[in-house]
C-alpha cells in the first residue's frame, strides 16, 4: 500500500478540516500523513506509539511532506493504558487493534480519549485468524458486533483495499455514544 491507498481508506469518512485527532499505534506515520492530508494544517494530530525510533522517523517524514510539524504532537506510550490526551474529535487506529486479544477492553480505553460522538476510524485486515505478525485480526463483521459492546455506535464499512498479506484491508467508522470525559 502507498500513501494514496492510505488516504483512500480514510477519505470516505468525509473528515472535516481542523479539530483534534490521534493516530494510535502511529508507527512511522503512514496513516498520520493520510490523516494530515484530510484534516489540513489547522488540525492538531497526536501520533501515539511506544517506539521512539518510529516516532522520530514519523517526524522527519512529516516535516519533509508538509514543511513543518507545528500541529503534530508526539506521545510515547501505550494507548491501551491511560494517556494524557485531551478530548479528541477523532482517532485513527490502523493495524493496531490486532495486537490485542481483549479488544473490547482496548476499545473502551480508546473511547475515553474521544468527545461524545467522537469518530473512530479503524483500518484492519479482514480476517479473524492471525499469525505471528498479526496475532488477533478481526473481520468487519466481528468488529460490527464488538464495537457497540465497547460504547460505540454500530460501525459502517467505508472502503476495502487488497493485500498480498492476509487477504485484504477494510476501513470502518463508528462514533462514541458514551464518553468518560
Image: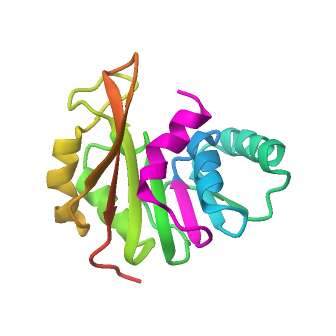
Q: Is residue 100 left or right of residue 44?
A: left
Determine whether, in the image, residue 94 is placed left or right of residue 99: right
Q: Is residue 124 visible?
A: yes
Q: Where is residue 142 drawn, in percent x and y?
A: 17, 44
Vertical arrangement, residue 178 with respect to residue 37, above or below: below
Quarter of the picture containing the C terminus is bottom left
**Location of residue 55 in the rendering, given as x and y in whole percent from the top left corner:** 68, 45
Q: Position of residue 72 (x, y in %)?
A: 71, 60
Identify the residue at horizontal 34%, vertical 79% (top origin): 179
Q: Residue at x 58, y 71 (%)?
A: 20
Q: Would residue 5 be counted in the magenta stretch?
A: yes
Q: How many marks?
A: 0
Q: In the rendered image, is residue 76 in sight? A: no
For residue 117, above or below residue 137: below
Colour treatment of the image: rainbow
View extreme (top): residue: 164
Q: Left or right: where does residue 1 sit relative to residue 95? A: right
Q: Is residue 117 left or right of residue 144?
A: right
Q: Position of residue 40 (x, y in %)?
A: 67, 61
- Given residues 128 and 10, the one toward you in this image is 10
What's the residue at 39%, 60% (across, down)? 120
Magenta-colored span: 1-23
Is 91 magenta? The answer is: no
Q: Quadrant of residue 7?
A: top right
| Residue beneath the point at 30% across and 65% down | 108
Q: Nearer the viewer, residue 47 or 10?
A: 10
Amino acid at each position: 500500500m502507498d500513501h494514496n491507498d492510505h488516504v483512500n481508506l480514510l477519505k470516505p469518512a468525509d473528515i472535516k478540516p481542523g479539530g483534534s485527532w490521534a493516530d494510535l499505534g502511529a508507527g512511522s506515520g503512514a496513516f498520520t500523513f493520510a490523516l494530515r492530508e484530510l484534516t489540513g494544517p489547522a488540525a492538531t494530530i497526536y501520533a501515539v506509539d511506544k517506539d521512539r525510533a518510529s516516532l522520530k522517523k514519523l517526524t522527519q517524514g512529516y516535516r519533509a511532506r508538509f514543511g513543518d510539524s507545528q500541529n503534530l504532537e508526539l506521545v510515547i506510550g501505550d494507548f491501551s493504558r491511560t494517556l494524557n490526551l485531551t478530548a479528541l474529535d477523532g482517532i485513527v487506529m490502523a493495524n493496531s487493534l490486532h495486537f490485542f486479544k481483549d479488544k473490547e477492553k482496548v476499545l473502551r480505553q480508546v473511547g475515553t480519549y474521544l468527545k461524545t460522538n467522537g469518530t473512530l476510524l479503524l483500518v484492519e485486515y479482514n480476517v479473524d485468524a492471525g499469525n505471528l505478525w498479526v496475532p488477533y485480526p478481526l473481520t468487519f463483521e466481528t468488529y460490527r458486533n464488538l464495537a457497540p459492546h465497547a460504547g460505540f455506535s454500530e460501525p459502517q464499512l467505508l472502503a476495502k483495499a487488497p493485500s498480498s498479506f492476509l487477504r485484504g484491508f477494510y476501513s470502518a467508522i463508528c462514533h462514541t455514544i458514551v464518553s468518560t470525559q
